[in-house]
Image (cartoon, rainbow, N blue to C red):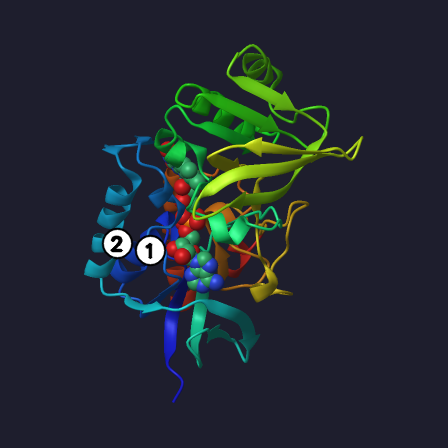
Amino acid sequence: MVETYDVVIVGAGAAGLTAAIYSGRKALKTLLVTGPNIGGETNSTNDIRNYPGYEGPGPDLMKRFWEQAKKWGSEVRESLVLKVSRNDGLFNVELSEGGSVLSRSVILCYGRERRKLGIPGEDKFFGRGLSTCTTCDAPLFPDKITAVIGGGNSGVEGALELARIAKKVYLIHRRDKFRADEVTVEKARSEPKIEILTDTVPVEIKGDKFVEALIVKNVKTGELRELEVQGVFSEIGWVTRTDMVEGLVETNEVGEIVVDKFTRTKTPGLYACGDVTCIPYKQTVISAGMGAIAALDAYKFVTGSQASDEYSK
Ligand SMILES: Cc1cc2nc3c(=O)[nH]c(=O)nc-3n(C[C@H](O)[C@H](O)[C@H](O)COP(=O)(O)OP(=O)(O)OC[C@H]3O[C@@H](n4cnc5c(N)ncnc54)[C@H](O)[C@@H]3O)c2cc1C
């Protein structure tokens, strides 16, 4: 028989784990389904300074979230959610481990994915000189030659951060104008360790076991250049996937799930929290707060204590 839950929470980052704490404390029959990265993106930083009441490594903070979530009795399954659909007033949640579960409500907390470069060498050298997190990995490149790809704030700030540690930093941007704040770009321009290559795209990452070179191409002249680097940092943004909830949610112009102040999507009983949503500030504390709101509202929805006129955007 297919198991039926009050709440299925998708993802165990700050949003999902907080939703599990609140849902468990409301004695809702809760299933937390998560991919392998328990703790989510907060695990990527070793220095959280803006989470109220806590300063220290991200993974340690998320371990506390995880321990507290488990304490309140949610069932946990390590599996990816492949699809959420709605049938006869219940949600059908399809799992990658096979099979599916039913639920009266679903809270989507699955965050977003880093955009890929889509060039040869990307998969081979990920974690072997290629990083998608300058904040996390810059300290691993003292006195090395590095390249940062990306013209937004993350890219330019990343290059500045690396310049404090590395011997040299190439800052590679596909256009001639940066998207980053002008003040930050000016700082990068006046930093002697940074060489800016505009109108330039990465073509291939090369090496034996670790990164040894980055091939780049000037999009205006077509000229190829081999940069001898030991570190490549890809800071080209994020993608929000919504194919698993197609038709059940509205998305904004950048593909994020649109929610109201109760974290409700357009489908009653379907909630979304944290980085997967249209809420502009992607921060651990904000994801946690949204997880709490979702679980409290799901409780009202599941127990029928929600006045129908409350359901408005
Ligand atoms: C380098 C870096 C540094 C940062 N520093 C800070 C900081 O100092 N302070 C701060 O407040 N914020 C910081 N952030 C932002 C913060 O990490 C995010 O805002 C926060 O992690 C978002 O939490 P979330 O729960 O919404 O999503 P995530 O943390 O992304 O969690 C998503 C969860 O969903 C799971 N998942 C994904 N797909 C599926 C699926 N199909 N099925 C089931 N589970 C799935 C994942 O395994 C993961 O457990 C930083 C982020 C980065 C990358």
The Cα atoms of the two marked residues, 2 and 1, are separated by 8 Å
Residue 125 at x, y percent in the picture:
48, 48
Q: Where is 247 relative to 185, above or below?
A: below
Identified by mark 2, the residue type is: Trp
Q: Where is 209 relative to 220, above or below?
A: below
Residue under label 1, please give it.
38
25 to the left or right of 234: left
Residue 72 at x, y percent in the picture:
22, 60
Ligand 1 neighbours mark 2 (CB distance < 8 Å): no
Q: What SS does tag 1 mark?
A: loop
Residue under label 2, please give it.
66
Mark 1 and mark 2 in contact (Cβ < 8 Å)? yes
Task: State the residue at coordinates (68%, 45%).
Answer: 253
48 to the left or right of 193: left
Task: State the residue at coordinates (38%, 36%).
Answer: 136
Q: What SS does tag 2 mark?
A: helix
Comes first in the chain, label 2 or label 1 = 1
Q: Residue furthest bottom?
A: 1
Residue 169 seen by the camera: yes
